[in-house]
Each structure stands twice: as C-alpha cells, then as structure tokens.
C-alpha cells in the first residue's frame, strides 16, 4: 500500500507468527527490497528492486490469453530452451522469462549476452496456420515491439531485416523464432525476445554495436510495466496477423530498404542494394543488373566505404 504496516497485522492476515513475518522481511531485504522498520509503526516498503515479479506483471496485464500462463525463473541456459521443452504441454500464450541466461543465443547460434537487467523471454504460440505463413509471426512481433517502445518510452525503433530492432543504428532487441511442425502445418512456435533494457552497453562486445533502453533514455525503466505493454501489443498484432496493415507497418518501419547490404545464407553470399521487402517477408535485392528474392539469411548493413570495398 505504500503505508506503514504493523508486524502484528501482517501476521494476522497471513496466519503466521510475527517471528515468521520478520524472517520473510529479512529474505526480501536480501533480494534487494528496501524495507524500513519501526517498533511503533511496523514495516514500510521504501524501494523495490528491479526484479521480474509475476504478481506485478499479472496485476497490470490486460491481455486475454498472452502471458496468462507466466513462469519467471532466475538463471537458465536460455528461455527458448526451457520453452521448447515445455511447449507441447503448455497452452498457447505461455510466457517464460528469466533474470539471466547463461547460453543466450541469436541467429546462427551466435551467443547473446544476457546479464541481469535485460528482458529475456520466450512466447509459446500455437497459431493455426500453414508452415509457409510462419513468417507472419515474426512480422507481427517486430511491429508490436516497435509500438510498445514508442507508446511507453517514446523511443523510435526500426526493424533491421530479418529480426532485429535498432535505435540509432545500434541493436536494442533480437527476435529468435523456432518452430515445430507436422507436414505443412505449424504445431507451435517459440518466439524468443532479447531486449537490452537496464543494461550497461559498455559490457557488450564492441563489434555488436548494441545499446540499451536505459542508455537511450538516461535512466532505468520499469521492466514489469514494459513487459505488460509488449505482451498487450503482441496480442493485438497476433490477432491481425497476415493483414495488409501489419505488412505495411512492418515495411514502413524497415531500416534495411534502400541500404547496401551483405547477405550471408546457405545459398551463398550476396552484396547489393535492398530495393523493397515483399509481403511474404522476402528481401528484394538488386545485385548488379539483377533483382533477387532472399527469404532467409544473415544481413549486414554496409556503410558507404564498406559497400565500395565489397564491390572491388
């Protein structure tokens, strides 16, 4: 409540002893909660730590199905690994979160630094769709993330094809989707989100060109409140998945159109200018006098000098 509460009152309401109340207060203090104590007034919560809290998230979440099944863990190898192990038996919309990941990963199994203070979570989605339409999930999630960062924090993030969000040309978020399918129908998709929230970018590898929400704003953000906004926007985007509206917004937020890029894929490497993005998520690349459709690959934005060097 933000007010002083007596140990006697808490003991009565929780049906435990005052000694047990004191023990729990000590446990909360060890977790970072600042709690004042007075022999006459009782206890007062003066500051809450930046911890993921299921009660806080559930209390402010306004979704119908996304995040209603919520699991928050301390340290895991990766939230995607946990979600994949649980996905078959979990309802659609289950969300797995962790304070830290020891084996966080991005595209092509690259390591993803996941220290405390970030938002590391995976969504289990069981959408009814052909496997060929799975790209719509990635498209919808990217759009929803941009909306959430804009509406809550006033930050203008753009989408770097195929699955990164950038602010001022620095990565703020990565999306990693892994799917299970039967023949040509989606069984389930696990969508991993790695968001640099209250992290210090100086701790990230320099070559990754990363930033964080706290670094962009000059102060820490409320992770629980942002998570609620993100889940609400993703649920709305999922309900409009595959629509022309979603595609147009995804395309308009692209930072890759009209850029010189290098694409690395199993089919080989390509260097050229991105002239457009197709409604099925494919990148349209002009390489010399030819235009090519690229459905998947690792994309690097080239600076002008880099592009000249690649052409030599």
Image (cartoon, grey):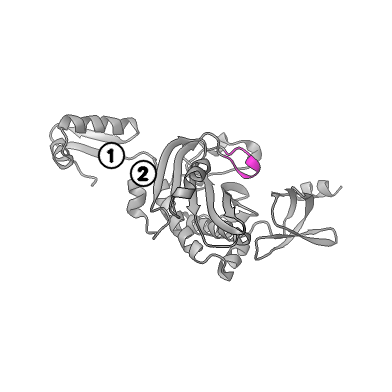
Residue found farthest to the front? 183
Q: Position of residue 169 (x, y in %)?
A: 63, 49
Which residue appears at 61% of the width and 52% of the height?
163
Q: Position of residue 111 (x, y in %)?
A: 60, 37
Most frequent secondary structure within the magenta stretch: loop
Residue nearest the observer in this picture, 224 or 305: 224
Q: How many marks?
A: 2
**Does residue 222 appear in the picture of this structure?**
no
Q: Is residue 228 magenta?
A: no
Relative to 199, does residue 242 appear above or below in the rendering?
below
- Distance between mark 2 and mark 1 Cα atoms: 17 Å
Q: Earlier in the sequence, mark 2 or mark 1?
A: 1
Which residue appears at 56% of the width and 62% of the height?
129
Rendered image: mark on residue 46:
1
Q: Position of residue 291 (x, y in %)?
A: 80, 62
Q: Position of residue 215 (x, y in %)?
A: 52, 43
Rendered image: mark on residue 53:
2
Rendered image: mark on residue 271:
none
Mark 1 neighbour density, 10 Å: few (under 14) some (14–19) many (20 or more): few
**Does residue 23 appear in the picture of this structure?**
yes
Residue nearest the observer in this picture, 105 or 28: 105
Magenta stretch bounds: 105-112
């Amino acid at each position: 409540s933000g007010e002083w509460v007596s140990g006697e009152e808490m003991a009565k309401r929780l049906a435990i002893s005052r000694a047990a109340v004191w023990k729990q207060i000590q446990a909360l203090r060890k977790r970072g909660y600042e709690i004042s104590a007075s022999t006459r007034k009782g206890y007062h919560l003066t500051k809450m730590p930046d911890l993921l809290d299921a009660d806080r998230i559930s209390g402010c979440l306004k979704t119908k199905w996304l995040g209603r099944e919520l699991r928050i863990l301390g340290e895991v190898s990766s939230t995607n690994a946990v979600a994949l192990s649980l996905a078959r038996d979990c309802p659609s919309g289950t969300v797995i979160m962790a304070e830290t990941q020891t084996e966080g990963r991005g595209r092509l199994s690259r390591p993803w630094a996941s220290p405390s203070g970030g938002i590391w979570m995976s969504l289990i989605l069981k959408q009814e769709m052909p496997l060929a339409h799975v790209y719509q999930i990635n498209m919808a999630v990217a759009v929803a993330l941009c909306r959430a960062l804009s509406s809550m924090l006033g930050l203008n993030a753009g989408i770097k094809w195929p699955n990164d969000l950038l602010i001022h040309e620095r990565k703020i978020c990565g999306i990693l989707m892994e799917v299970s399918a039967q023949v040509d129908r989606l069984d389930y998709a696990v969508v991993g989100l790695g968001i640099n929230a209250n992290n210090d970018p100086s701790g990230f590898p320099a070559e990754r060109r990363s930033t964080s929400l706290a670094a962009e704003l000059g102060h820490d953000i409320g992770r629980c409140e942002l998570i609620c906004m993100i889940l609400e926007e993703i649920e709305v985007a999922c309900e409009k998945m595959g629509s022309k509206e979603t595609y147009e917004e995804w395309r308009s937020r692209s930072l890759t159109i009209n850029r010189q890029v290098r694409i690395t894929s199993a089919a080989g490497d390509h260097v050229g200018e991105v002239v457009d993005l197709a409604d099925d998520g494919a990148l349209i690349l002009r390489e010399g006098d030819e235009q090519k459709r690229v459905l998947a690959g690792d994309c690097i934005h080239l600076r002008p000098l880099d592009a000249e060097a690649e052409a030599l």
